Image (cartoon, rainbow, N blue to C red):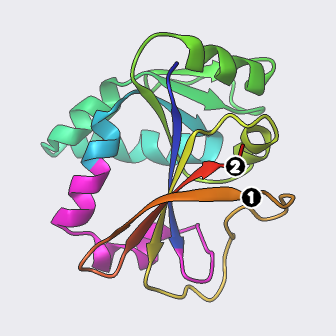
């Protein structure tokens, strides 16, 4: 069975939105290498609407600029959880009906991991149904001072730390699995 892996950038004060504003000073080769390893181990993406729309705007432009990773990103199948999108044009399928059932079905299909970027409303469903197999929280050494926080409004959920990966830049990727 495929794993569903979530990869999320987060500040020390738990903020997840606008990583382009606070994260870029820390993006280096070590950061890129770790991200490439996660990305290379997947053959599909799961995205919420907001992440999908932001990525669909950025990645095709990056491919035009010659970014080799963008070629693969644009080609990967994407599954988008949204109650408001009526069409998806960036090699994506909008999940219709029960999101938890569809994600569970996707995980049973043969293939590599499914990678989920971003954290938001979709996570309530994924947590409730215990569908995420690994969380990769990229803790950046920065305090944002405000913004959307990681898992705002969710019930208490216990996770098990399985690995921590420090980078020279000060980022630490904390890899967790759900406690079973």
The earlier-in-sequence mark between 1 and 2 is: 1
**Residue at 53%, 70% in the rendered image:** 10
Residue 31 shown left or right of residue 7 in the figure: left
- Where on the picture, by quarter, is residue 155? bottom right
Relative to residue 44, is residue 65 depicted above or below? below
Residue 36 shown left or right of residue 68 in the figure: right
- Where on the picture, by quarter, is residue 180? top right
**Residue at 52%, 18% in the rendered image:** 1
Question: Residue 37, percent across and down?
Answer: 27, 44
Q: Nearer the viewer, residue 49 or 7?
A: 7
Q: Secondary structure at mark 1?
A: loop
Name the residue beneath numbered marker 1.
Answer: 158
Name the residue beneath numbered marker 2.
Answer: 179
Mark 1 closeness class: few <14, some 14–19, many ≥20 residues within 10 Å: few
**Residue 16, which numbered label?**
none
**Residue at 23%, 79% in the rendered image:** 168
Which span is picked out in magenta? 11-35
- Where on the picture, by quarter, is residue 73? top left
Relative to residue 63, is residue 9 depicted above or below? below
């Amino acid at each position: 069975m495929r794993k569903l892996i979530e990869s999320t950038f987060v500040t020390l004060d738990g903020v997840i939105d606008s990583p382009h504003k606070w994260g870029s000073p820390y993006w280096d080769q070590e950061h890129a290498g770790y991200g490439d390893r996660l990305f290379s181990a997947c053959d599909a993406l799961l995205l919420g609407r907001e992440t999908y729309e932001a990525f669909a705007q950025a990645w095709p432009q990056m491919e035009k600029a010659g970014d080799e990773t963008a070629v693969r990103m644009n080609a990967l199948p994407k599954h988008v959880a949204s109650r408001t999108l009526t069409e998806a044009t960036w090699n994506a399928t909008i999940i219709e009906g029960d999101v938890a059932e569809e994600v569970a079905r996707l995980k049973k299909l043969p293939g590599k991991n499914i990678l989920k970027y971003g954290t938001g409303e979709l996570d309530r469903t994924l947590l409730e149904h215990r569908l995420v197999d690994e969380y990769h929280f990229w803790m950046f050494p920065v305090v944002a001072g405000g913004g959307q926080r990681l898992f705002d409004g969710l019930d208490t959920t216990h996770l098990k730390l399985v690995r921590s990966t420090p980078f020279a830049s000060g980022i630490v990727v904390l890899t967790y699995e759900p406690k079973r």
